[in-house]
Image: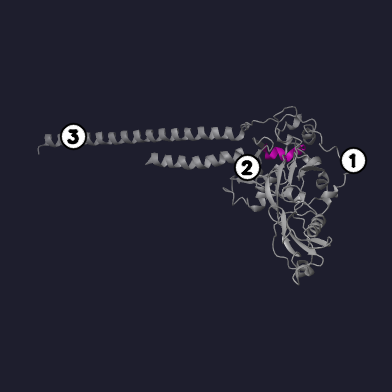
Amino acid sequence: MSSPDRLLSLRIGRTLRIDLARRRDYRAHKDRAEDEKNVRQAAGIILAVLGTVALNGCGPQGKADNLEIVDRAAADAAYQAQYRLPVPRSQAADILVAKQMNADRCRPWAGGDGSKAASPLPAELRRESLSDGDLVEVHVEGDQAVLGEQAIFSGDYIISREGTIKLPFIGAFRADGRTPESLAAEIASALERGEFYNEAPRVSVLLSDLGPVRVTVAGAVFEPSPMDLGKPEGTLTDERRINARGASTDARNLTVALRRAGGVRPDADLSAVELRRGGRSYRFDLRPVIEGRAFQDVMLVSGDEVIVPSRLCFQDELMVPSPISPPGISLFLSNLIQPTQGNAPAAVGREARSVPYGTRMMQGIVGTNCVGGVRATNASRSAALFSRNPLTDVSIVVERDVEDMRVRQDRDDYDPFLLPGDAIACYDSGVTNVADAARILGIVGGAALLAGAN
């Protein structure tokens, strides 16, 4: 190759190398610009979302919208005055007024104010009354002499579902609702009329065992329904008691029936609890039961109807354990706050779900592990109570700031009593919400940056 040709070839090669280098530099610059653009876009999205979460987490929460309002003068006011929204602590004037606000809405006691001494039970309710399913032992004097060696009338009889016992040759006798003495007198007269005896023999009727009774409970109780009382539970081990004559039980008492019906509601009028039996009506003042004073209970028989009237108001004084109160409260709880991530790690177990009657919302919140922890992140938690007005069956949601309830002195005015079936949910603080969102978005943003870099 001549010198001119070699020189031309060198120039062309140099030009190609310069052009190739420029192309590589251009592509690298373009890729860097594209990466920087992707980074700016991802950062902008993350900052925007974090800002929104921060504002929502630290700002005021939306107020629950309820059909019922809390106003002592309103006809559609909520069940408890404790449901009302707390006023700012700086504006609080009168304190501990919720109990009186509830009482101001009450109807007068139907049975009087209780200033008079309680009247004794009517004689027919104090006496032993028979009921269907009861086992009675009938003894007729000289029974063996009537038809030979074997007794024909004496023996054990179970009162039938129709409320009768049937004796041989002399037919059926109405037994339910009667005393053993009156039944014995009727049997003696029947034996004389049937000419089994020249004159009425001596007859005894002994109640040997009490059977279950079917009664109904309605009105201001949590679970109005018909029920069977006095069903035998377990086996008696005392042979003397098994072989002894006679029978007694508390399982058929009026107070037991009220407790079996879920217990009396806080709006119950205990001054005039009604018992309907055999076409007659009786009224009892059960306020001594709540107050721990002496009370003469009533044994129920099959067919009895118990009606508990209402005062149409919430009575704080009825929110105590008693023989006629609910045996306890079953709650529905949810605690998904940090760092537990679930109800099981939050120790929301049987002890938290079942609490004594008279427990308040803040106690339930503590039971869900919604209170305490690191102040910087956990102090601003909130909780919501989901309840239902037993008078109207209308639901209500009550929200509380946990830290505000902890520090205010009038907390009792805004701390509702828990009712059977209530639900409590715990929510994280705004700081925890932002931190959790930052953690999640940081992972997402990092993945986006890696994808852009590749």
First-in-chain label (3 vs 2): 3
Q: Secondary structure at mark 3?
A: helix
- Mark 1 is surrounded, within 10 Å at the Cα level, by few (under 14), some (14 to 19) or many (20 or more) other residues, namely few
Q: Residue furthest top?
A: 73
Inter-mark Cα distance, 3 to 1: 125 Å
Question: In the rendering, at what x and y percent does residue 265 appear?
Answer: 73, 42
Q: Nearer the viewer, residue 412 or 139?
A: 139
**Residue on which the image places disc 2:** 426
First-in-chain label (3 vs 1): 3
> Is 171 on the left-hand or right-hand side of 4?
right
- Picture quarter with the N terminus: top left
Region in magenta? 400-412
Residue 75: quadrant of the picture = top right
Residue occupying the point 69% across, 39% down: 403
Residues at marks 3 and 1 touching, judged by CB atoms closer than 8 Å: no
Residues at marks 1 and 2 touching, judged by CB atoms closer than 8 Å: no
Residue occupying the point 57% across, 39% down: 433
* Eye-nearest disc, 3 or 2: 2
**Residue on which the image places disc 1:** 116
Residue 52: quadrant of the picture = top right
Q: Nearer the viewer, residue 302 or 189?
A: 189
Q: Residue furthest right?
A: 116
Q: Nearer the viewer, residue 416 or 421?
A: 421
Instruction: Indicate which disc residue 103 carries.
Output: none
Residue occupying the point 66% across, 50% down: 352
**Residue on which the image places disc 3:** 12
* 409 inside magenta stretch: yes
Q: Is residue 202 above or below residue 91?
A: below
Question: In the rendering, at what x and y percent does residue 170 appear?
Answer: 74, 59
> Is 432 on the left-hand or right-hand side of 104?
left
- Mark 3 is surrounded, within 10 Å at the Cα level, by few (under 14), some (14 to 19) or many (20 or more) other residues, namely few
